[in-house]
Amino acid sequence: MADPAPPLISLWRAHLANNRRRSQHTVRAYVATAERLTEFLADHWGERPDARRLGDVTQADLRAFLAARRGDGLANRSTARELSAIRAFLAFAGEHSGSDGSAPRIKGPRIKRSLPRPIAPDDIMALGDVMASRDAPGWVQARDWAVLLLLYGAGLRISEAMGLTAAVLPLGETLRITGKGNKQRVVPVLPQLRDAISQYVALAPFDFSVDTPLFRGTRGGPLSPALVRRSMMNARRLLGLAEDATPHALRHSFATHLLAGGADLRSLQELLGHASLSSTQIYTQVDAAQLLDVYENAHPRA
């Protein structure tokens, strides 16, 4: 007898977390989608679906569900994510029940893919100067400068940088990073970055034992990503930079500037920790967009 939906969803949660090694945010979102779908189908069909019954989902059923979600105010991008989660859940239900379980073919909403906007190198250095000169203890200024160099110089996500422990000390020429899905990669450490982190550690009034966070707040606990975002927000506003000059934009800048300097896509994929090359290929469009901007501003016939 097939499992009813609640146990199936528990299995789905465990599968995402343990087998697929998805982040807690992805697990929460995908499980919420599965719960919404099964609740909708229970009302739509008049019975709660089990794993085998989920194999009977039709295009009309999915369209009705997505229409209801759009009625809740779901935007195109969120609708596309919802549909992706549904396909994965139905495939899992099919494997669990021994049926085909593949989702009916249904076209998702069109999404205009926005290009990441890199920050110019001079502006990045200016941001660092402002962040390192604000009214704060010297070790806090050194910390913020080190964080900025780490995000731009090594292309880390802010969560990856904040997740580092003092076990990485003393820094060598490379750093092993655990990214999304517990995927590990090795990134180079520039001498300037190594010096910045060493200076921060020397000034900070904390003990840096192996299992303690590398970047600390003023009370000694782990540094919050929100504080880094706020510090950068204040700096960009003082400089008059665009609102999209965020910590994550430093990662985009790392990728774009490497590509412009001759890096190949496969190497860039490894440095960024992208699971798919298609995620990295967007930076070729960024580089092309920059070339077009230069052309339009410089060519007399443009």
Image (cartoon, rainbow, N blue to C red):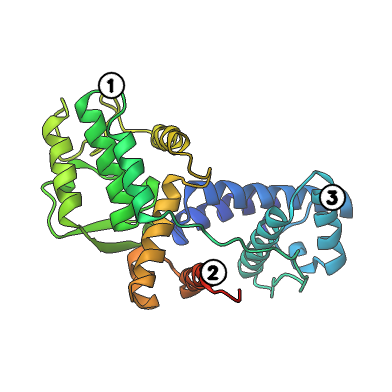
Q: Residues within 10 Å of mark 3 (few under 14, many from 20)?
A: few
**Where is mark 3, residue-wise?**
68
Which callout, 2 or 1, points to the residue nearer the camera?
Answer: 2
Q: Could you tell whether 215 is left or right of 201 in the image? A: right
| Contact, mark 3 vs mark 1 (Cβ under 8 Å) | no
Please tell me whether residue 96 is drawn above or below residue 79 in the rendered image. Answer: below
Mark 3 and mark 2 in contact? Answer it, CB < 8 Å. Answer: no
Q: Report the amino acid beneath label 1.
A: Arg
Disc 1: which residue? 219
Q: Amino acid at mark 3?
A: Ala
Picture quadrant where residue 219 is located: top left
Give the quarter of the figure containing the C terminus.
bottom right
Q: Tell me which residue sits at (34%, 57%) in the image.
A: 155
Q: In the visual, does 139 lie left or right of 59?
A: left
Instruction: Identify which amino acid the numbered label 2 is placed on.
Output: Ala
Q: CA distance from mark 3 to mark 2?
A: 38 Å
Q: Which quarter of the image is occupied by the N terminus? A: bottom right
The residue identified by callout 2 is 289
Q: What separation in Å lies between label 2 and label 1 (alpha carbons)?
A: 44 Å
Whichever of callouts 3 and 1 sits on the residue coming sooner in the sequence is 3
Q: Earlier in the sequence, mark 3 or mark 2?
A: 3
Whether residue 177 appears in this view of the structure is yes
Q: Estimate the x, y position of residue 256 in percent, counting from the top left.
A: 41, 65
> Measured from the top left, where is residue 88 in percent x and y?
62, 64
| Local secondary structure at mark 1 | loop
Disc 2 element = helix
For marks 2 and 1 on the same chain, the one whose residue lies earlier in the sequence: 1
- Residue 260 in the image: above or below residue 184: below
Where residue 128 appears, as percent x and y from the top left, is 31, 41
Quadrant position of residue 223:
top left
